[in-house]
Each structure stands twice: as structure tokens, then as C-alpha cells.
Amino acid sequence: MAQMVQTVTGAIPVSALGRTLMHEHLFIAFGGAEFDPTATMDRAAVIAEAVRRLVELRERHGVASFVDPCPIELGRDPQMMKEISERSGMQIICTTGFYFEDLGLPPYWRARSVEEIAELYIREITLGIGATGIRAGAIKVATGAPVITEQEKKFLAAACIAQKATGVPMITHTQDGVGAPEQQRLFADGGVAAHRCLIGHCCGNADPAYHRRVVDGGSYIGFDRIGILRLMPDETRADNLARLVKDGFRKQIMMSQDRHCFWLGKMQRQLSAEDQAYIAAQRAQGKWPPPYTYMFTDFMPMLHARGVTEADIAVILEENPRRLFAGEPLNG
Ligand SMILES: [Zn+2]
């Protein structure tokens, strides 16, 4: 079993992870934003704001570790993550791995073989990303909807090879609340144990039977878009999370928000006039992007009202991330 986790500032013992958010972002740039002359960024200001937000998260809510599974082609910037980690005192873990076909997968890598993609992933985990010396601590896998494409299956198969070669966990993206059972089957086909996989964004599906399938399959389940109300009301997320806890599955739940601190240029979809006005108003009050503390200030009370205890939260935010990184079996 793994004793150490790679953070952007070096290896730490898994026991030092502490309270961990498993799926957040610092900075996102969709491919092509770099060609938009209206998309500008003050790097020093972005770093300062990220540091301010992470210090708040650490000091007010005791979060010690922050996993940023930014796909390679979505502006992943390990050097900036390292600087933010050093200045904020937050342990940050980055990942290797590409996004899903609709919004990612650069043509150069679509043309590569499974083995070539796996070689890149293994190199980023064992040697480092580019020439930075910063090593990825997990593998990001993403699939789209309504079905998983052939290209996505190829990248997922490469991730399986890299997982088995390195022992780091998988953190996934599912789209539109579908694809989790299919991902689990593909991981099993690729020889990756279910308990090494966090199947992400499952809270994008309102059906408890869907969540039950994922936990019965032995993986971790991501309720990791808390606060993204455009995709699901938080009341539904809280109902479903509390149900899983009541049914005995607290050892498999991961809570996070999939937030970001800075987004280069426009969003990946066209915003309506209402959306733009809402964002402008929030930004004017310093509330956009929404803070990482939302989960603690707004969502936890909803969970407590549904019978979820502090002991349950400690398992979800501390024990489960440690167990996933260590590779401990669920009933070990
Ligand atoms: Zn994400």
C-alpha cells in the first residue's frame, strides 16, 4: 500500500493529508482561449486571490489538502499551483490525464496509441510534468454523454495501464449525471480495482438507485459539485448524500465543489443575458467565482438537518481521501 502522496511541493505521508477536498480547481482555460484577445490574465493577481481563498479555507475550516484534477489541456499549470501552495500553506495535489472528447482531447494525442498515452501519464507521475520536476499524484479520467466514445475509451485504457504501473488513484469526470457504471466496468476490464477509483460528479444524477449502483460496485462516489445549482439543487444533493450515509456507505463518499478561482476568457458555453448579469452582479460584490468555503458555510447545515453527524463528516473528508490514496481496501 502507498505510504506517500505526491503534492506539487513534493511527497508527503498519506497520514498527513488531513481534511481533503478531492475535486476543486484553481485556474481553468479551455483550449483556444489563448487566441482570444479579450481573454486576459494578471498572473500575480490570480495567484494572490487563490492564496487568499486557500488561507481562508485552511484557517476557518481546517482543510489541509486540495486536489486540483485539472486536465492537461485545460490550462493545467503545475508551477502556478506550486507557488500558490507555498504561499498559502495548502497541500495541493495535481493530476495527469486528459478531458473528454467534446471539450478536450487535443488532435495530437487523439492520434497516439494507448501505450504512448500511458507512457506520458507514467512519466508525469514518476518523473514530473514537462521539465518542472512537479509530479502528478493521481490520474484524471473523463468521459462524455450520452455514451462514452471510442477515443475516451482509449484514454481510459491508457489511464488503467498507468494506474497499475504507479499505484496512484483515479479521479473521474462524468457528464450529465451518466456514465458512472460504464466507467466502473471499463476500469474492471482494465484491471484496476474499484476502490482505487473516485467516480466523479455522481451528484449530477438525482436518482438514488444510480448512486447505489456506484457504491455497490465498490468505488468511491463523488458528491463533488456541491453548490453548482445550475446542474442540481443542493437539497437533492443533501437528500441523496444523507441517504447513502443512513444506508451505511459513508466510507465511500467524497465531498467537494468543482469550484475554480480564475477562468481565462469566456465560459465553455454561451451565457444568456441573465447569466451574464447575475455573474457581473456577484463579481461586483466579490462573490464571483463563489468561494471554496461554501460547502462548510451553506451545505453542512443542510446535511446536519438530515441527520449527518460530525463523525460522518470526519470519515468523508479525512478517512476516505487517505484510504483512496493509500489504496487500502474499503473493509480493511
Ligand atoms: Zn473539475
Image (tube, rainbow, N blue to C red):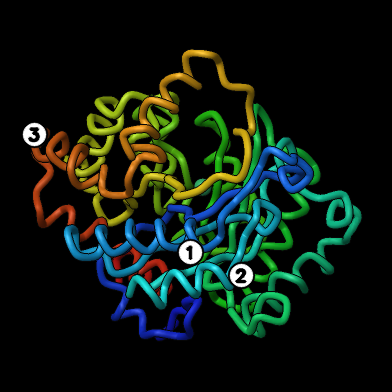
What residue sits right under mark 2 in the picture?
A: 163
Q: Residue at x 33, y 60 (%)?
A: 52
Residues at marks 3 and 1, CA–CA distance in whole angstroms:
31 Å
Question: Which of the 4 image quarters holds residue 53?
Answer: bottom left
State the image coordinates of residue 199 (x, y, percent, origin top left). 48, 49
The reply to whether the residue tagged 1 has its Cβ within 8 angstroms of ligand 1 is no
Q: Residue at x 88, y 56 (%)?
A: 108
Position of residue 66 in the picture relative to residue 98 (left or right): left
* Rendered view: 175 above or below 52: above
- Residue 331 picture location, percent across and down: 29, 65
Q: Is residue 212 visible?
A: no
Residue 143 vertical placement versus 111 (above, below):
above
Direction right: furthest residue: 111
Task: Say which residue label 3 marks.
Answer: 305
Q: Which residue is mark 1?
A: 196
The reply to whether discs 3 and 2 touch (Cβ–Cβ < 8 Å) is no
Placement of 313 over or under 201, stated as above or below:
below
Looking at numbered disc 1 in the image, what kind of residue is underneath it?
Arg
Horizontal side of 16 relative to 199 (left or right) equals left
The residue located at (35%, 58%) in the rendering is 21
Residue count near mark 2 (Cα–Cα under 10 Å), binned few <14, some 14–19, many ≥20: many
Q: Are marks 1 and 2 in contact (CB under 8 Å)?
A: yes
Q: Which is more toward the observer, 315 or 217?
A: 315
Q: Is label 2 in a helix, a strand or a loop? A: helix
| Among the 4 quarters of the image, the one containing residue 126 | bottom right
**Does the beta carbon of the residue at mark 3 sit less than 8 Å from ligand 1?**
no
CA separation, marks 1 and 2? 9 Å
Q: Amino acid at mark 2?
A: Gln
Give the alpha-carbon distance from disc 3 to disc 2, as whole Å. 39 Å
| Camera-side mark, 3 or 2 | 3
Kindly state the secondary structure of the residue where label 1 is placed: helix
